[in-house]
Amino acid sequence: MWINNLVNFKKVYIENISTLIIYPKNFTEKLPVIFFYHGWSSNKDVHKNLGSFLACNGYMVVIPDSINHGERGTIDYWQGESGLTKFWPTVLSSVKEFSFILDYIKSNYNIDEHRIGVSGHSMGGMITSGIIAHNKCIKAGVIMNSSGAWVEATLEIIGDQYKDNKDYIDKSLNELSSYSPINNINNFNNTPLLLLHGDKDALVPIKSEIAFFNAIKDHYQNKDLVDMKTYDRLNHYITEAIVSEALQWFDTYL
């Protein structure tokens, strides 16, 4: 396969976190790094092509499996109570695991530690916003079809399930609120951030991401460092246009 002539693929286990690392061949300079996080029910290998594209453009791309995904086991994602009880623990676990993975990458690869980016789709975008909100080392981020307003997004996503599980959901969201990026905007510190979202997204409706964008743009001193692009009639998908916008953002700010 032609891509194998351009990039290296390595699968590693970092404190039992199965991780795919993709980086360009014959690259002698220190590499900027993009961490990419997959969505709910997905896994690292689904985004191998996206990672390869970014790596061909001069980046090391690090794609971990989240807990209960890929090589770390699976659950019934869409039936029963798993979506209610496992989703946010999965997000928070990935946010916490970021530092372990970054330390491993720093110790084992020739990277530019001042050029660390993060991106993700759907649940991975929520992980992305959480990482930026709770880590000062991120230089740029791109969020795809997701939301940095975690509580608001949850209520949009679960819809009618709320009334059937009100007590449990209220307790969970109250605990979640303090971690939500929209409630930690001071921590973003003008980190360049691009939000990409389909206006017909049926899984993560765009409304809560617009609220997050408005809140964070009001806070940024340099308004050019935060942007949101919407795509007409696009549902919950990653398109070539989205990937192209992400690459352009990282080329500019990372």
Image: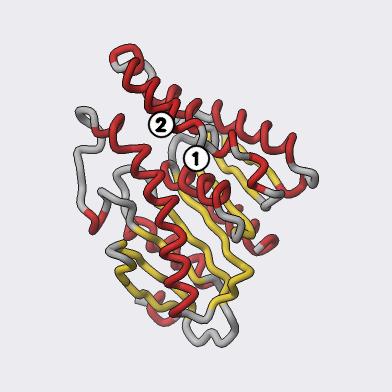
Query: Image point 43% across, 37% down: which residue?
Result: 236
User: The N terminus appears in which quarter of the rendering?
Assistant: bottom left
Q: Are marks 2 and 1 in contact (CB under 8 Å)?
A: yes
Residue 241 appears in view: no
Quick check: 185 above or below 68?
Answer: above
Write down the quadrant of residue 227 in the picture: top right
User: The C terminus appears in which quarter of the rendering?
Assistant: bottom right
Which type of secondary structure does the marked residue at label 2 adopt? loop
Callout 1, which amino acid?
Asn
Query: Image point 30% across, 69% down: which residue?
Result: 13
Circle 1 crowding by C-alpha within 10 Å: few under 14, some 14–19, many from 20 = many
96 or 254, which is in the foreground?
96
Write down the quadrant of residue 28 in the picture: bottom right
68 or 120, which is in the foreground?
68
Which type of secondary structure does the marked residue at label 1 adopt? loop
Callout 2, which amino acid?
Leu
Coordinates of residue 39 in the picture (x, y in percent): 38, 46
**Disc ID at residue 189:** none
57 or 37, which is in the foreground?
37
Residue denoted by label 1: 145
Coordinates of residue 131 in the picture (x, y in percent): 51, 51
> Furthest residue to the top?
163
The answer for how far apart the CA atoms under marks 2 and 1 are is: 9 Å
Query: Image point 42% across, 63% down: which residue?
Result: 100
Side (left or right) of 253 relative to 202: right
Side (left or right) of 179 relative to 82: right
Residue denoted by label 2: 203
Circle 2 crowding by C-alpha within 10 Å: few under 14, some 14–19, many from 20 = some
Q: Earlier in the sequence, mark 2 or mark 1?
A: 1
